[in-house]
Image (spheres, coloured by chain):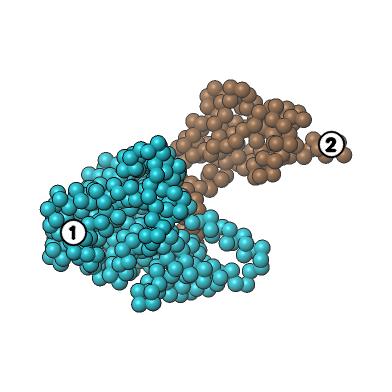
Amino acid sequence: MHGEAHAWVPQVLFGLNAMWVSTLVLVATYAVIMSEKMNRAIAALLGAGAMILLGVLNQEAAIRGVDFNTIALLIGMMLVVAITRRSGVFQYVAIWAAKKVQANPAGILFMLQIVTALFSALLDNVTTVLLVVPVTLVITEELKLKPWPFLVALIFASNIGGTSTLIGDPPNILIGSATGLTFNQFVLNLAPVVVVIQVLTAALFHLMWGCKLHATKENRARVMSFSEAEAITDVRLLKQSLGVLALIIGGFIGAHSLGLEPGTIAMFGAALLLLLYCLGRNAEEQSHEVHHLFGEVEWVTIFFFVGLFIVVSGVEKAGVLGMLAEMLVSMTGGDMKVTAIAILWASAILSAVVDNIPFVATMIPLIKSMAPVFGGEQAIEPLWWALSLGACLGGNGTLVGASANLTVAGLAERAGHPIRFIPFMKVAFGLMLLSVAISNVYLVLRYL
Amino acid sequence: MSCQAIISNPPAILEKSTTVAEALAILREKGVNALPVTDAKGHFLGVFGLRELIVLLLPRAVRLGVEMGELGFVSDTLDDLRHRLGAFAKDSIGKHMAPHRAVRAETPLVEALMLLYRGDSYLPVVDGAGKLIGIVSANDAMTRVVEGI
């Protein structure tokens, strides 16, 4: 991908050491992101600008550092969800699931976790919780139950479910795009352990909360009187959305043999659904609708990724990551088992306290440069699964561990049911460690 | 021209310690949609009206705004709505009032008209210390304009 003819040699201002300068920019950028004093997109873009202005990268090298496959995949899926949600299908499924268990609180707690985990496997985690939390709040209010157990369980389900596919969680999108691992490889390697973790987590939530939840007959009858059919606002749009979504998923599954990247499939699917959505509307209406749908793309996330890619590309080009990889290899003695387990646990603990996206973006080139020591790209495949499991599941550890957690906390606060940092961590950190321990056993048994 | 010329007295002023039930009675008695809310010293704090009452009839998730999406699937009866509102009857309106933009007496009339055009039915007018001194309503503004025709 990066032709040698275009290789950029850092020419840092005043002849300063490129390694030190790029590391300083990276550390400063990450420190500002973690402090949450500045919007993370601004911080990442300033860091990216600094890499170029200081001469670690030139503009051409910086743009080559941006993974446009990831960007296209994110934007494409955001557009597809923005249109699909207008059909009301997600509310329909949540209500259907609640009624399927006769509005029994323990049953609803279980069903909403399963629905969330499944949605999350196919959609971004933040999107999933934005779709499921509002209807969950309506259901728990009708049942006169505190929403806290439900919301905590949804956070877990979104992060666990998202771990199972290439498109389910940003760390997986990043890993898939950088390594060329396919959609099917992600499912085959991660879904088995994810299913075990989700079932076990749901069982523990049942023992902790589910079996103690009680709702009166009258309140359950109120939920049973919900009409899921009324949630569907546009049947034509529903059919179009589900059709295109099925095509996209089919595309992801068959993409490898066609030589197509996930970014192309998601973006083409989005364009197709936009076309169907705009059919029959005049030019002015089309322009209005498309403008609004593009407005629903989370541009903060997109620009955060762009900035981050450039910052990481800077430290990579300066040789910092290669040096760190050598140090890591010498620390683990070049032992695959030790390296994989170290990556799993370090990713989990770090992802519980800091944003997992910058961490994974940095780890990818670092792990890549370890490939020669372990005998090539194929040999390091277990390391990618260790990174994915650690980074995705680690996000459950604290309220700030993943964007989905903060999104749920934000929604809960606005609805008058705040989720606090410490009470959440008391429940979540242990459960997160348990899920990582299961992943550890799985990795050892299957790969190491 | 400033707002000064068309400032009028509000039909009533609600204190933030007023209960929801009392506020509802005052709104119905005066036949208005919303009234300004002040603290005991007369500082303007926000408004409380039918909009703030309607949200108390609905599931709390409605307060999420656009993220709630549609609510067509909920089939609550009138009794359910009464029951929900009843739970808030003794709350002070300070907990449920909405923040609201206020203008000053010296605010240009055209600016106030633009704010009225954007959806406010009237604008509270405050002095430099934030005390409520009156309101500017669309009705008063229109009456003043028509007088000259």
Chain letter, colour cyan in render:
A
Q: Which residue is mark 1?
A: A373
List x then y, in percent, for residue B1: 77, 30
Q: Which residue is mark 2?
A: B147
Quarter where residue A17 is shown: top left
| Colour seen for chain B | brown
List x then y, in percent, for residue A143: 35, 55
Which residue is pictured at 31% across the width and 63% down the height?
A: A179
> In the structure shown, which secondary structural element does the residue marked by tag 2 occupy?
helix
Which residue is pictured at 66% across the width and 44% down the height?
A: B118
Q: Residue furthest right?
A: B149
Chain ID of residue with mark 2: B
Observer-nearest residue: A117 or A30?
A30
- Badge count: 2
Same chain assignment for discs 1 and 2: no
Q: The C terminus of chain B appears in which quarter of the rendering?
A: top right
Q: Residues within 10 Å of mark 1 (few under 14, many from 20)?
A: some
Which residue is pictured at 50% across the width and 47% down the height?
A: B55
> In the structure shown, which secondary structural element does the residue marked by tag 1 occupy?
helix
Q: Amino acid at mark 2?
A: Glu
Q: Is residue B58 visible?
A: no
Q: Amino acid at mark 1?
A: Val
Q: Is residue A330 left or right of residue A22?
A: left
Q: Residues within 10 Å of mark 2 (few under 14, many from 20)?
A: few
Instruction: Work out how far the residue at label 1 is from the one at label 2, CA to CA, in angstroms.
Output: 89 Å
Observer-nearest residue: B80 or A190?
A190
Which residue is pictured at 40% across the width and 60% down the height?
A: A5
